[in-house]
Amino acid sequence: MNYFHYQDEALLCEEVPVAEIAAQVGTPFYLYSCRTLRHHFRVFDSAFAEVPHIVCFAVKANSNTAILRTFVREGGGVDIVSGGELFRALKAGVDPGKVVYSGVGKRDDEIDDALKAGILMFNVESDQELETINERARKLGARAGVGLRVNPDVDPETHPHISTGLKENKFGINVEASLAAYHRAAALKHLDIKGVSCHIGSQVTKLSPFTDALARLKELVRRLREEGNAVRYLDLGGGLGITYDREAPPHPSEYARAIIDASRDMECTFIFEPGRVIVGNAGILVTRVLYTKGNEGKRFVIVDAGMNDLLRPSLYGSYHQLQPVIRREREKITADVVGPICESGDFLAKGRQIPAFERGELIAVMSAGAYGFSMSSNYNSRPRIPEVLVRDGSCYVIRERETREDLIRGEKIPDFLNT
Ligand SMILES: *Cc1c(COP(=O)(O)O)cnc(C)c1O
């Protein structure tokens, strides 16, 4: 469900023709629908209405402060994985009491900033991290809320690069070791143990990996409570998948039903860290065809967006639908849609059946709202592209196109090279 659709032959974002926005801001650019963002947040949040819960949007999926603010206004918290994400979330006005901090490699300065901000909890991924957070909290005269990130060893059946809950992955503490880790944490004076957490992977399209992980966590919570530990929060991470092509992931309401039914009598506050399912289908990437050509029987459509703008196809071989911004009857061809970057891995689609796109035409790369702009880079010295938000018939540039000067900001030519 989203608000990108055709009227007559023109693709609209809500009520605004995408071609008009392209004429105003130039290409390429990211385009988000505010109505879709809110709708997705509300669907997810209301699915858990019958249990105490906090929806902590995973900032890494889309880190724009206007997008974060949209969810903050809906009562959302955030899941962060760096000091930079904490900075963004605070700028967006998030309630620090709804911030959870995940990630295997938290630096001392990042921990200090999160302690000073008074976040809800750190999802801790190792014994050394427990000791470190305790020590930083002692120095600052603070108490740190912590949850242990457990690796439940379940197969999320997703792409290996986005699977995180298998025992060979770098994330979390394995279930057997987590009891001992809890005992150590309980002995550390500046820690306040708040709960347990897990995150099994991303773009998960079945319910069973989530319920399997929950069953393992439940058992751990039972044992911890038997020992007299208060376990208030149960953080089940993110990972619910979306439809890029033909995937049929569970609806958030089915996901919620399964979780709620499997956790009766647990008496805890749930935390969820959804990213992709909230923003993925709320954004597109709009690009223009620069050239078309044929080489040795292969056809190429060369567009002005590259792997630096949208990395997912190159990184994971991900599928994104390609739609004409202005539709018309025409022949279909099989082609590679590639960017201008000097890498053979720079493509948006390979061997894809597509309309015979022509030079100058606009293409919408669908489902690009998650892990799109947030993974972009300046590779090949390409300025990062703008982000535009549509709301109620108006569009707002929520991040300007970078300039050439932005490309060299902070660079210095030392004096010895000038003499
Ligand atoms: C990436 C990540 C998420 C969000 O994952 P989605 O698949 O986008 O929902 C949530 N929690 C943690 C710890 C993550 O690393």
Image (cartoon, helix red, strand yellow):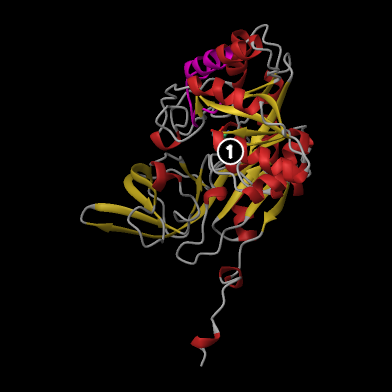
* Residue appearing at x 69%, y 53% in the figure: 398
Place of residue 310 in the rendered image (x, y in percent of width and height, measured from the top left): 49, 50
Question: Which residue is nearer to you in this view: 375 or 170?
Answer: 170
Is residue 117 a member of the stretch shown in magenta?
Answer: no
Q: Quadrant of ligand 1?
A: top right
Q: Which residue sits furthest left?
A: 296
Identify whether 48 is placed above or below 380.
above
Q: Could you tell me residue 170's position as x and y percent?
A: 45, 36
Q: In the image shown, does 276 or 186 lie closer to the viewer?
A: 186
Residue nearest the observer in this picture, 302 or 20 = 302
Name the one closer to the observer, 319 or 376: 376
Q: Which secondary structure lies at badge 1?
A: helix
Task: Tell me the amino acid under the disc marked 1.
Answer: Glu
Whether 317 is drawn above or below 418: the answer is above
Q: Is disc 1 surrounded by few (<14), some (14 to 19) or many (20+) residues within 10 Å?
A: some
State how many labels appear: 1
**Residue occupying the point 68% across, 32% down:** 56
Quarter the N terminus occupies: top right
Can residue 68 be seen at all in this image of the molecule? Answer: no
In this figure, which residue is indicated by the disc labeled 1?
129
Is residue 51 placed above or below 327 in the rendered structure?
above
Side of 117 where 81 appears, left or right: left
Magenta span covers which residues? 198-218
